[in-house]
Image (cartoon, rainbow, N blue to C red):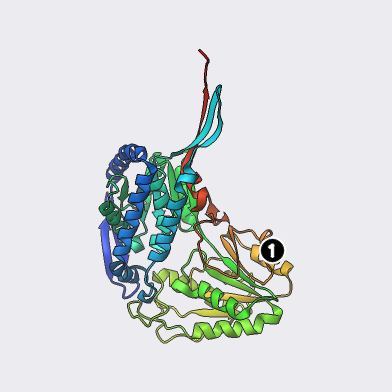
Amino acid sequence: MTKTLQCISPIDGSVYAERQTFSFEQATQNVARAGSAQRQWAARPIAERIELVLAGVAKVGQMNDEIVPELAWQMGRPVRYGGEFGGFEERSKYMAEIAEESLAPILIEDSDNFERRIIREPHGVVMVIAPWNYPYMTAVNTVAPALIAGNAVVLKHATQTLLVGERMAKAFHQAGVPEDVFQNIFLDHDTTSALIAAKSFGFVNFTGSVGGGQAMEKAAAGTFTNLGLELGGKDPGYVMDDANVEAAAETLIDGAMFNSGQCCCGIERIYVYRSHYDEFVDRAVAIVESYKLGNPLDQSTTLGPMANKRFADEVRAQTEEALAQGATAHISKFAEDDAGTYLSPQVLTNVNHDMRVMHDESFGPVVGIMKVDSDEQAIELMNDSEFGLTASLWTNDTQRAANIGARVETGTVFMNRADYLDPALCWTGCKQTGRGGALSVIGYQNLTRPKSYHLRKLQS
């Protein structure tokens, strides 16, 4: 039975877009077509696949003037930031540049007696289940390299960003990628799980909540389907005694508040060396007080609404609980805060790890700041989390950052920067942040399987 998916705009609560879901039978037929088309796609020269994928990326760029306001209507990001095409293109181009080398056979021996080599083969049909918070960039992390590696791709996008998958598919099809090779489909959760349980895919990449990741694993149980899971986060920043406080405050607070705090690797908790604590808090508060909360279609807006009222309500609940437990709020309620999707940003001090705001994922414009007296204390606090995606360390001592980074349970260690995805490095996490890795050469390894050839040459 089909259902109607509705994107409720955070701007005004209106229904911005709606689509009918595919039935299991219809989706199965689409996947079968993808499987048939994949074999021909994989047989094409890799240079041709790269050219077509990059042409698809360029087509998305040509749509950017339409995409930017669509994103504002769908998930609330202010139009002043210009959308996601910069990162979308950067990641795709890098993966295209390294594709031939990353996917090249590994030759072990080519002698008169033996030829031994390892090749990378595509999984077949790859399913990408993409989130709403960075709907283009998170999707292309897998879509571009999966297609380049010779897979067919079935994209299921979040309901909150219902139009993104359509946009991407249209662009790639206009560029010459066959329609069956890259498909956008609309599914409810039950049908998604049923497809995975039916062994429909060689690889499934999911970005979303911990609960969503658990649903993926349950659906795939016993199928041996390869999974890539990027789940929750509670990323820390640590400002050391030799840090540039002004730069640290500017970057970390932007990392906490940009996109209304709805960033996979957003900064959600900050630990500051006692000697810099007061200065850092003062700078953080001044930065946040300068924001303009409002309609994301207004070029002057720097902070838009959260994507959904229930997301905003969770942030409000964590903040109110922290205040009841003794935390101090430094930001007065903004006039535009409507108790709905429009939410005032907040900086909290006098916080501790007994408060949910310091250990549960907030995914909104609130950050707690604690003072520390040593690296040991900071490491202990940074590791006191169920999640591990990134950690941002602020110091002028590279070796100190490396030594601390070696002890922090995380997927990426930043020094003097935050909230950036470098496509040359593996995007990965640990603990309840998930498993697997996207982008870099490791991304190609996860989107293909190794196959060995041991060829013995008999002499006549």
Vertical placement of 98 versus 285: above or below?
above
Residue at point 48%, 85% (across, down)? 290
Q: Nearer the viewer, residue 301 or 58?
A: 58
Would you call the spot at circle 1 few (<14 residues within 10 Å), some (14-19), or many (20 or more)? some
Residue 374 percent across, percent down from the top left? 74, 71
Say if 293 sits above or below 431 in the image: below
Q: Position of residue 389 (x, y in %)?
A: 56, 60
Whether 383 is drawn above or below 299: the answer is above
Percent x, y of residue 117: 52, 32
Front residue of 5/141: it is 141
Residue at x 38%, y 64% (from the top left corner): 85
Residue closest to the far top: 460
Residue 90 appears left or right of 378: left
Q: Quadrant of residue 200?
A: top left
Q: Where is residue 91, by image quadrant?
A: bottom left
395 on left or right of 423: right
Residue at 41% in and 64% down:
134
Residue wearing tag 1? 404
**Dot 1 amino acid type:** Ile
Name the one closer to the observer, 139 or 86: 86
